[in-house]
Image (tube, coloured by chain):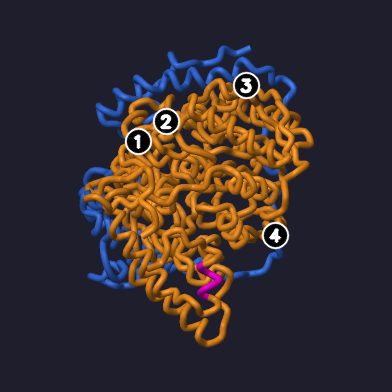
Amino acid sequence: MAEVPGSDALDLEGLARLARLRLTEEEAEAFRRQLPAILEAMRRLQELDLDHVEPLAHPLDLACPLREDRVETGAEPGDVLREAPRHADGFFLVPAVLPARDAEPGGAGSSRTDLEATESNEIDSSGGDSDRGESDGADREGTP
Amino acid sequence: MIPRELSAAEAAGRIRRGELRARELVDGCLERCRRVEPLINAFITVDAGGVRAAAEEVDRRVAAGEDPGPLAGVPVAVKDNICTRDLPTTCGSRMLESFRPGYDATAVGRLRAAGAVIFAKTNLDEFGLGSSTEHSAFGPTRNPWSSEHVPGGSSGGSAAALAAGVVPLALGTDTGGSVRQPAAHCGNVGLKPHYGAVSRYGLVAFASSFDGIGPMARTAADAALLYNVLAGHDRRDSTSLPQNGGIPPESLAAPVQGLSVAVPRAWLEHCDAEVVRVFDDTARALRDLGVTLREVRLPSPRHALAAYAVLSDAEVSSNLARYDGVRYGRRARGADRLDALYVRSRSEGLGQEVKRRILLGTCVLSAGYQDAYYIRAQRARRLFQAEIDAALGDAAALFLPTAPTPPFRLGERRGDPLAMYAGDLYTIPANLTGRPAVSFPAGWTSDGLPVGMQLYGRRDGAATLMQLAAAVGRAVEAPRPAPDPSHDGGAFDRRGAGET
C-alpha cells in the first residue's frame, strides 16, 4: 500500500504554480506555518475504515438530466462580452499565448508589449485599418 | 414611523390591501440603513434609486387593482455572491469589484416576480470562504448586538441587516453553515434548504456539491414565506430537485406534541458553557411542548470536519480557476504573456483566505494526494451520510447547537484558520448530507449576545423543521428589539433600545 503523503511532502511553490498564484513573502511565510497543521487534520481520515465504501461525489443521486434537442435562446453575446476587460469582434482579447520570437518578419513578434500591432495583424482581416474593432467604451483592465 | 419589527408577512399584507405604501416602507428602511450602516458595514451596494422605483411600481400596480405578489413591496437584502442584473456582484472580492452580471440569479428573479424589492447587496467573506465576515475585501461587518463582535459568516452582512432592523428579509448562502451560523450569532432564523431545493443558477460557485441559497428572517413565519418564493425546480440548474414542496403557512401553527428529536449529547463536549445552558433550556422547552428527546451517538465530528475541508477546498480550487482576468473581473496591467496575465490577475484579485483554501484544494487533488485525501473524503462522506441517517432513525429531526460558542470578537480567530474552521463543527453535517437544517434564536449569553439552536431534518423535512422552530420560538424568551446604534452618540445598547 502506497504511503500516504503528509505535510512534510508539502511543496508550496509547486502548488502555487499549479494554482497560477504568485505569493507574497508574507503570504508564503503564513502558509508555510498554517498549512501543515490543516493538512494533518485532514489526514485523520486515515483513521476510518473505508475499504468497502464507495465514494460519494454528490449528495443527490441524480443522473445528468436531459432535455429536448431544441434550439433555445441562451445568454446574449452583448451581455457576456460587456464584462470583458478587452474584446473585439466577439472575441476576448488576451496577450500573446506563446513567447515572442526574435526578428519575426514584419516585426510583429518582436515587441512583446506591442499588443495592438499583434492583434490587428491576427484578427483584423476585414480591412478596418486603424479600427481594431474594440467595443465601445472602456478598456476595463483591472485597477490597482 | 414604521415599526422596526414589522414582519415581512404583515408588510406584504398591508401593501397588497393598499393600507401601506411600499414607497413609504422602503423610505423608512433606507433611512434606517443610512443611520446604522456606518456602524455595522453590512452592505456593499445600496441602490436607493432602484429601490424607490421598484417600490413605486408596486404601489402603481396595487392602485390599478393588480396583485404584485406574496412579497409585494417587501425589501430584501441579497448576499453579494448572488447575481443581480446590472447591480455590482462583487462576492466581497477585489477580483469582481466592478463586475455587473447581465442576468439575475433564478432566486432573484423569483423574488422580483413575487413583488419583492431588491434592497441591497450584503457583505460576506470573500466568495463565501469564512465564518466571520472578516475576510471581505470591503471591511468586516460588525454584530449589531456588539460592535466588538463578529456577526458570523459568511452571510454576516445579511444577518446584520436583519438584526439591525434595516430589512425584514435577506438571502444568504450556506456551504458549511454560512446561513445558519450568522443567523445564530445575530439572533435570526436562518434555513439551509435541502440541497437542490433552491436553484443555484446565478449563485457564484464555491463548492458545488455543498452550496445552497437560504432564506433569513427575524421569525420562522417570515423565513418560510421567503422559502416558498425561492424553492422550486429550475431547468437551468442541473442539480435542481425535480419537484419540491413548500412550507404550508398553517403548518407553522400546528402543535408539535408527539414529534421526537434525536440529541447527539456527546457532541456538546465541544461547547462553551453558555451555549450548553441555552441548549438545556431549549431542550426543556421542547419537552414542555410534548416533544420526545432521545439521545443518539454520532460519528466523530473530527472526521466530518476533515471530510468537509478536503472536499470543499478541492471544489473551490476548481471553481475559482475561472478567475483568470480574461472574460470578466479584474485584469492585471502590464502582463505581456497569457500565463503572466493569469498569475498577476489572480494574485492581485484574490484574498489570503481564498488563496489558502485554493492551495489546500490543489494539494488534495494533486498526484500522490488525490486518492489518499480527495477520494478518501468522498468515501467518508458516504459513510457519514449513512451513520447520520441511522442515528436520526424515525425522529423528525436532530437537535443540536448551531455553533460551539457565542459570537467571538473581531480579530480573535483571524490568524488561526484551524480555530475558525472548528466553529463549523455543528453546521457541516447538513452540507455533507444535503439535508435541510435551520437555526433559530433560542437565548442569550450573560453579556446579551444571541445564541441560536439548530434542527437538522429529513429529506422532505423542511416544513417540520420550521414547525418546530416556530413552536420553540413562541415558547422561549421573546427576541429582544433590535439595538439602535444611533442612540447615545452611537454606542450600541445590547439591552435593547425599545421601540422608537
| Chain letter for mark 4 | B
Are labels 3 and 4 on one chain? yes
**Chain where mark 2 sits:** B
| Residues at marks 3 and 4, CA–CA distance in whole angstroms | 35 Å
Inspect the image, locate mark 2, and give the three-letter code of the amino acid beneath it: Leu
User: Height in image: A44 above or below A16?
Assistant: above
Quick check: A37 above or below B323?
A: above
Q: Amino acid at mark 3?
A: Ala
Q: Secondary structure at mark 3?
A: helix
The residue pinned by badge 2 equals: B359
Both on one chain, marks 2 and 4? Answer: yes
The answer to whether residue B406 shows anywhere in this view is yes
Please say if B224 is above or below B293. Answer: below
Q: Secondary structure at mark 4?
A: helix
Label 1, label 3: how far apart the Cα atoms are: 42 Å
Q: Colour of chain A?
A: blue
The answer to which quarter of the image holds residue B106 is bottom right
Marks 3 and 2: in contact by CB < 8 Å? no
Q: Main secondary structure of the magenta part?
A: helix
In the depicted structure, whether residue B210 falls above or below residue B481? above
Q: Label 4 sits on what residue type? A: Glu
2 and 1 marks in contact (CB < 8 Å): yes
The picture places residue B81, in percent across and down from the top left corner, at 44, 52
Q: Which residue is mark 1?
A: A21
Name the element at disc 1.
loop
Rendering colour (chain B): orange
Q: Which mark lies nearer to you, 1 or 4?
A: 4
Q: Residue B350, percent across and down?
A: 34, 41
B125 sits to left or right of B383 = left
Task: Please state the extent of the stretch shown in magenta in the rendering.
Answer: B11-15
